[in-house]
Image: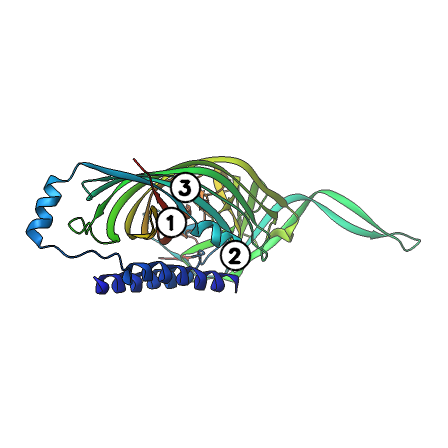
Amino acid sequence: MKKIFAIILSFAATVLLISSCEEENCPPNSLAYAVFALSDQYGNSLQFTSPVSVIGQIQADVTVNDTLEDGTIQEIIKADSIINDTIINQESASEYFQLPLSYDNYTRFIIAYDETNFDTITINHQNIPYFTNLDCGTMMFYNVTDVTYTRHVLDSLTTTNPNIDNNEKENFKIYYTNFAVDE
Amino acid sequence: MKKKTSRFIILTLLLTSNLFLLSSPARAQKKDKETLKKEYKESPLYQGSWVGLEILGAGNYLLGGDFFSTEIIFQSNLKNRFLPVLEVGYGKTDATNNTNNLHYKTSAPYFRIGMDYNIFYLKPYLPGFLFGGLRFGMTSFSYDVDGPTMQDPNYGGVITVPFSYTGLKSNANWLELVLGIKVKIYKRFNMGWTVRYKLRMNAKEHPNSQPWYIPGYGKNNSNSFNLMYNLIYDLPF
């Protein structure tokens, strides 16, 4: 009888120790990226042979400080300013792009293959601020509502998964034919 | 530090309660097995009921924990072997993470229904007994979650989005495997504790969040261990 209770007490103490060591399991990646897989017309993955840049672009009201003649600083709102963010700078040898969407309701990506060849992809998206637990902070997820693109170099683009969250999964597939790419 | 202190107090309480059982002078004379079996067969089906009050959840909260919970336990004794039980409780939290200023608030009642099995049912002369059991728990609640304005980490950080959601309705249900003891202290007064392994079955999420704390279940993990400490009174009927 005493033995049984001793076992139970040991078990209880173990449980206390386990519960006191409880930690939150925060996801290792708290940012949500749109993943673009590069593909040839047959669906095989491919890489660019020459370096490629990707510029993210949004349009937003920007507050700037203007120094007046009397030395005072005045805040001026520049409406609908174009904001560019170079996300990938002259990189190659990758079979996919991971690009961050903006907190606006659309994000435009300009793929610069070289100095004269560009494609523009515009993604309209619904933003979903997300909370998992108190220790891990908030995250922004997205739901893609519409995609438009130019076809100067790329052949076509399909949306494979419109839900963009912190699980790194393919969201878009960009198809190329025979321009500056390696299979 | 507060948490460490509370753990120490809880452990002391547990040990103290069991010393009552180990050193109890009320241990009656042992009877042979056949006599005990005969007495068990002749014993009535209904052998009483008791009510209990869970105090560990409230104690933890008073010592600085984030969660408050307390519950009343109604349990009956059938043949000193099967112990159907109903647990009605109330859980709440109003916690803020000082590092990221995220705030979560909820409060709601919860219910559990289940059955315990007295492992020592053939030893009614003992001042207490060891039992195992199963519970099905459920709750329906709403929660608020808010935090600092979210700022776009890219594109110059010029776009910000507020983060505040109130009155998000959710519900959850879960299973609990229970192991515990009940010990007579004085006349109709008893103490007892249970160790519980909780297994979440369902917790409703929202597009913008998942509940962090579920009343009656605790943190919204897929499973967890939990300790409960009860003050129990045997009803006179």
Image quarter for residue B52? top left
**Which residue in the rendered view is the most extreme toward the right?**
A70
Q: How far from the left and from the top, in percent, is residue A33?
A: 48, 51
Of the two numbered discs 3 and 2 in the rendering, the one whose residue sits closer to the viewer: 2
Please give the residue where the numbered disc 3 appears in the rendered image.
A158
The three-letter code of the residue at mark 1 reads Asn
Judged from the image, the secondary structure of the residue bearing numbered disc 3 is strand
Labels 2 and 1: the sequence-earlier one: 2
Chain to which the residue tagged by mark 1 belongs: B
Q: Which mark is residue B230?
A: 1
Along the viewing direction, whichever of B89 and B53 lies nearer the viewer: B53
Q: CA distance from mark 2 to mark 1?
A: 18 Å
Amino acid type, mark 2? Leu
- The crowding category of the residue bearing disc 1, from other C-alpha atoms within 10 Å (few below 14, some 14 to 19, many at least 20), is many
What residue would you read off at disc 2?
A: B63
In the visual, does B211 lie left or right of B83?
right
Camera-side residue of A118 and B7 = B7
Graded by Cα atoms within 10 Å as few (under 14), some (14 to 19) or many (20 or more), the crowding at tag 3 reads few
- What kind of element bears circle 1? strand
The kind of residue tagged 3 is: Thr
Percent position of residue A123, x then y:
52, 41
